[in-house]
Amino acid sequence: MKYTMRDNGLYNGHNRRIAFTRGDEIYDGDNRRVATMHGNYLFDSENRKMMTVRGGFIFDVDNKQVASLVEVQKLIKSAEEGMQAVALWYCFIR
């Protein structure tokens, strides 16, 4: 399924908003905060580190490479480079 980013929202192939960002925080479609971005790091709602972006790659909490930034851009139409698209991908698509 292809996803699209518009403004601060992430939409699925049926044009339904499944997530959005407000500042550095990420919310699901039901308006619940699920994560926070700090620089190249993503933390869950209890402030535990979830992932890191280094170079062109995404690493999970165990420092295992899980994807590349190129993969994220292929799955999310209109995704620009940056932490916002990567964080949304990590929380809702992968």
Image: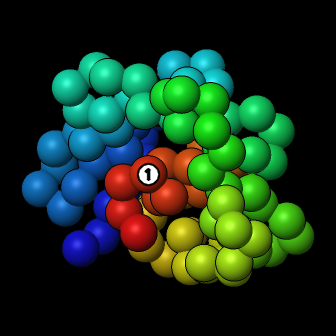
Q: Position of residue 82 (x, y in %)?
A: 71, 51
Task: State the quadrant of the N terminus.
Answer: bottom left
Q: Residue visible at 50% across and 77% down?
A: 74
Outermost residue to the left? 14
The quadrant in which residue 69 appears is: bottom right
Task: State the quadrant of the C terminus.
Answer: bottom left
Q: How many marks are shown on the rendered structure?
A: 1
**SS of the residue under disc 1:** helix
Question: Could you tell me if residue 34 is visible in this image?
Answer: yes
Q: Position of residue 2 (x, y in %)?
A: 30, 70
Q: Tell me if 80 is positioned left or right of 30 in this view.
A: right
Q: Residue visible at 75% across and 71% down?
A: 63
Question: Could you tell me if residue 81 is visible in this image?
Answer: no
Q: Residue visible at 80% across and 48% down?
A: 40
Residue labelled with disc 1: 91
Q: Position of residue 26 (x, y in %)?
A: 48, 31
Please tell me whether residue 85 is drawn above or below residue 62 in the rendered image: above
Residue type highlighted by circle 1 = Cys
